[in-house]
Amino acid sequence: MVGLCLTLCAAGCTEQADDLGLEQLEIKGSVEEAAALAQAKDYQGATALLEAHASVPTPETRVLTMYGSSLIANRRASLGMWALGRAAEREDAPRNVQLAFLRALISGGDPLAAIDRATELLEAEPDDIAVLDLRAQAYDASMDYENALADLEIVGDENPETPILIERLLNLHIQIEDWDGARERIAELESLLARAGVDKDARTIFCATAATFEQQRGEIEAAEAKIRGCLEDYPAEANLAFTLTGILDADGRSEEATEFLADLVERFPKRQAIVHGYGQRLVSLGRREDAEALLLKSAKTATDHATWLAIANMRLAADDVDGTGEALDKAIEILLGQPSSDPDLDWSRMLPESRFGIGDVYIRAGRLETAARIIDSLTDEPAMAGLLRARIKLEQGDPQGALEDYQESFKTFPSNAVARYLAGRAAVEVGEFDLALEMYQDALRSEPTGTDAGFVLAQMLAAEGRYGWAMDALSFRSARSSNGDPLALRMLARLAAAASSHKYAEGLRALLSENLAWVGFAMADQAHDVEMVLGVQAAIDYLDGVKELEDPGYHEAFSAWYRLAFQVDREHEARKRLEGLLAAHPEDAGARIVEARALADDDDLEGAVAAYQKSIELSDTSNVPHYELGQVLAKLGRTDEAVAGFDRAAEFEDIDGRAAYGAVRALHEGGRGEEAIDRLRTILIDRPFHGASALLFVQIASEQADADPEEVYSMARRANRYHMHAGPSSHFEFGERALERDAFEDALLAYGAAVSKNYDLANALYGRARALVGLGRGAEAMTDLEAALNTEDLEAVAEATALLDELRADAQKG
């Protein structure tokens, strides 16, 4: 889903980009007046005046420079780049224009262009330290850390004892795992920060960085000691507090981390950053009601809008759009002094980005009148207004109209990741899968971690069998994630294994194993890969070598070993070892998951239910027990409970759609086809790659008298495209439906794919032959029919024989 984080900010400026081919505007003030406004930090007024000056056919260089700089001062670098780019290309462009343009390229998401531009400037002026510094920033943004470090070291030599430069150098040393170099920088910083006059922010930022460095090197004790020492001096600093919880989480001490934050909130209830962070942690632990109660309590004493905004973001993440709208109402009334329903509210007092995000939420909540007023206020940003209009069409079931509006808006507002993501969704709904891929790719490039476009794109490509491309997409997201993104790493390793890049997969799992919360999953996945490549014995030998197999946190690896042990006649040993695990760790939720799986394998489904419920009672922090509990309950015919289990699993994480699909299967098997169909439509909007859902939709809808044949055919086409997810039978499902409507090209595509995979070859050849006949290619059809009839697997022998005889007769006549 879209990760749209809301921000509210009173307007400091507006923005307009002249690459739109604007009509020349009326000049209402002089450039000097605009300069005075900018000097006074009234960027809204400055931009309003400069916009008209910039709209003339050949604006002055200084006008373009001031206009672009005003836009950038308003954090609108992507649109400010146009004006600065034109100014920088001119021969009379002063140096400050070049520097401003480089900054805009970096912050606007085009660091490679910034590198090229900076390199050109350095060829003319090799000693320009400011340009060199900007090139280092561009290298950093493009993840070329070695070159970034090389440039920044020169900058640092010219500016010795500058804490911010040393910290940047430290981070680059860490990125390339140059631990000796990082230690030298830490020593430099410690020496500088020991001096009098250094502000608190510099000290706490350094402390957090130094502790994180120790953690990344696996020195957990040193990291914890460092950060706790700093917390003694600054106990209410949020960045220090959250650094400590990160260290504790990495050490498998999540409960201690939660207790630490709870105590901190009790001691410092007015520290909103800590309160909000604790609330986010409670949500991640599945304690959303506790989180909301905490934030609502804080909102009673808070004097600004931030807490209500935190509540809005929390509700938005849970898809509670009505609750989100209510929280936004509170935040807006505090910020602007008027209720959002007031028709006289001047929305232009807020930044365009804020209005855009709020408008999106109100649209999703069905509050279209308020959304319309916000859209009307976006005269300073017509592209944003267009995107919101497209959003309304998407919500009202007009994906084609939405897609057209999105594409029109992208001509003037190309870098909005969320809008690109939603345009991808619209493209999926109208069957434009290639366009959807393009939109998701653009969303990923624009903001790699701002949406789940990387996950969706990777799974779309993988479901087509394009594993290399899928790995590239997910690698792009993972590399730009601040926390290593364990979900992305795990999926990337699975893609690598599917592409037979087993060494690469092993390396990724080794990296994932550094995260104690994921080490068991990494080892279980690796054992599965070894089993597929080298066999069961090699897999169990691998797990036999894991000495921590019975430790908490390794339960997934133990569970994999337990399953394999049954396959090599070590059943008695496995059962005894499981008994020992449960005796040693009776309160470990992971051990109870292993127990539940063992009971389910023994067909003791009621016992498995009890074990899963015990696991959830001990630690309700994962989707795994809920998902597997749903599976067992579905087998028992307890449909409502099963669906509730799957839905609860999806609340934690369901990036691949397994939980959502599990709920649909339970409903279908429980005879509730209408509910299943409704849910399948939802799954296939957010997860267009889910070929299995598309195929199930076709199968259920085919049993319904009022099914829309075009929708069914569209779903069959999707299942065929995403065949690696739907399975090879999707080719036959689509092929038969294509033949029924004389869509012979479609049928040829479907059956040809089945033939190429050697799947049910005889019947695939027969299907392809019928498609070829429809296309007037009888000679090729005869070859396929002869090959099909030469096997014992063909089902329609009589029909194939008759068709072949008919073709031979036609050939003789011809």
Image (tube, helix red, strand yellow):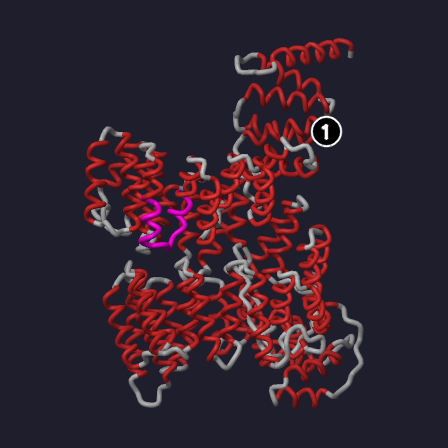
Question: Quick one: 84 or 397, which is closer to the camera?
Answer: 397
Q: Which residue is mark 1?
A: 741
* Crowding at mark 1 (Cα within 10 Å: few <14, some 14-19, many 20+): few
In the image, the segment drawn in magenta is 611-628
- Residue 223 point in image, percent of width and height: 27, 68
Question: Quick one: 608 or 110, which is closer to the camera?
Answer: 608
- Residue 678 point in image, percent of width and height: 60, 44
Q: Is residue 54 left or right of residue 316?
A: right
Chief SS of the magenta region: helix
Question: Quick one: 490 or 441, which is closer to the camera?
Answer: 490
Identity, as a three-letter code, of the amino acid under mark 1: Arg
- Residue 663 point in image, percent of width and height: 50, 42
Picture layout, residue 786 above or below residue 413: above
User: Residue visible at 53% across and 41% down?
Assistant: 664
Q: Image quarter for residue 98?
A: bottom right
Q: From the image, which quarter does the C terminus lie in? A: top right
User: Residue visible at 36% across and 42% down?
Assistant: 609
Secondary element at tag 1: loop
Residue 699 visible from this viewpoint: yes
